Amino acid sequence: MARASAGARLHFGFCNLSLSHERLYGALGVGLDSPRVVVDAEPAPAVRVTVEQAAGTPSKSGDSSPSVRDDVRGYATAAVDLLGVDGARVTVRESLPRHAGLGSGTQLAAATLAAVAAAYDLPARVRERAPALGRGGRSGVGVATFEDGGFVLDAGHPTARFTTDRPANGEWTVPPVAARHAVPDDWRFLLVAPEAAAGRNGAAEDDAMRTAVERAEPGLADRIAGIVTRRALPAVASGNAEAFGAAVAEIGRLNGAWYADEQGGVYRPPVGEVVDSLSGAASVFGAGQSSWGPTVYGVTDAARADAARDAGRRALDAAGVGGEVSVVRATDEGARVDESAGE
């Protein structure tokens, strides 16, 4: 039996949504050590999927085994076709909350492919095959962090190729990595998950992105480019968590201006209240919404981790919502694949 395990990822936003510039999207994000998705696979004559609700598996966004099972069945079926094998018995030991801003879809798809490939002692070639699984169509952060972890800036897609609609599954390539940096050992990321509906996904996400791209103000992309090159990249390269937190928080706020009409504000409710509260906490260097939310991130460090966790709880109380709070490490390693798990 083979096992693939991958951490979640944070998505800080895109560099450009305007059709006036030559490259579209260009995402920034970071790989996390936890929470994780864990998938086991072994050869079988057909595709069979089992989902376990492992202890500690996040379920705050309405994650349900039937939905995860449907997703994995689709990924596993595509994987056996891509690999040219008969089938696989796939067991999901741990799963990320679906559509919560933590990259559940890409990490689950990639882990399923990697586990099935390892079960047959075949190369997974995740980056090459991700488009056939419907992944990497806009952001390349999920695939890149699955491969190598770390802080990632991807190069986006040629605007002339993508326009307002992404091509059909399999008809794109995952954006190449434009820059990657290891995350300093003492950095930490506060995760605040308010009890709220899942983030945009599927057709609703496609519609929202199409509208945002059609209306995107190109000047915002120019401002974001300056923050990326003069603030975010130097901060992670030099290990300055305070400067990094402030930079990615500003990138997220500017991204929110593109989505304001689609999500009811710069941040979707109740994320805005949580972000505002965290932004005033001395232990949090910058806060924002990961992808479509509802997960809120905060940048902190090991020395301030406990204080940041307390700030997260206070932020939920101030917003009048329940939820979960954790502080996690980044990871500078990609997915873990074990070809002899359980032996």
Image: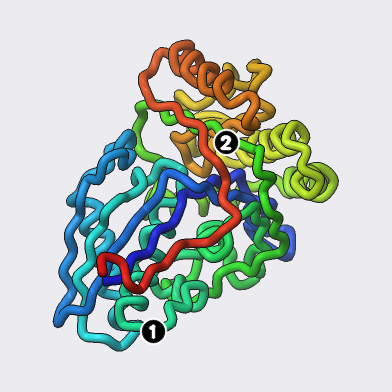
The extreme bottom residue here reads 84
Foreground: 3 or 31? 3
| Badge 1 amino acid | Leu
Q: Residues within 10 Å of mark 2 (few under 14, many from 20)?
A: many
Amino acid type of the residue that numbered disc 2 sits on in the rendered structure: Phe
Above or below, comparing residue 134 to residue 98 in the picture:
below
User: 98 or 254, which lies in front?
Assistant: 98
Question: What number is the disc on residue 122?
Answer: 1
Count residues near mark 1 (Cα–Cα under 10 Å), then give few for <14, some for 14-19, many for 20+: few
Residue at image point 51% right, 49% down: 9
Horizontal side, residue 44 vs residue 24: left or right: left
Asked whether residue 88 appears in the rendered view, the answer is yes
| Residue 29 against residue 199 in the figure, above or below | below
- Tag 1's secondary structure? loop
Q: Residue furthest front?
A: 343
How far across and how far down the image is residue 163, in percent?
59, 64
- In the image, residue 310 sits, relative to residue 230, either above or below, namely above
Quarter of the rendering occupied by the N terminus:
bottom left
Q: Which scheme is used to colour this image of the protein?
A: rainbow
Residue 283 drawn at (x, y percent): 65, 21
Can residue 17 be seen from the camera position used here?
no
Would residue 128 be found to the left or right of residue 285 on screen?
Answer: left
Please give the residue where the numbered disc 2 appears in the rendered image: 189
- Between the C-alphas of marks 1 and 2, the distance is 35 Å
Mark number displayed over residue 249? none
Residue 265: image quadrant is top right
- Secondary structure beneath dot 2 equals strand
Q: Position of residue 62 (x, y in %)?
A: 27, 38
N-terminal of the two: label 1 or label 2?
1
Q: Position of residue 120 (x, y in %)?
A: 31, 82
Horizontal side of 300 relative to 70 (left or right) equals right
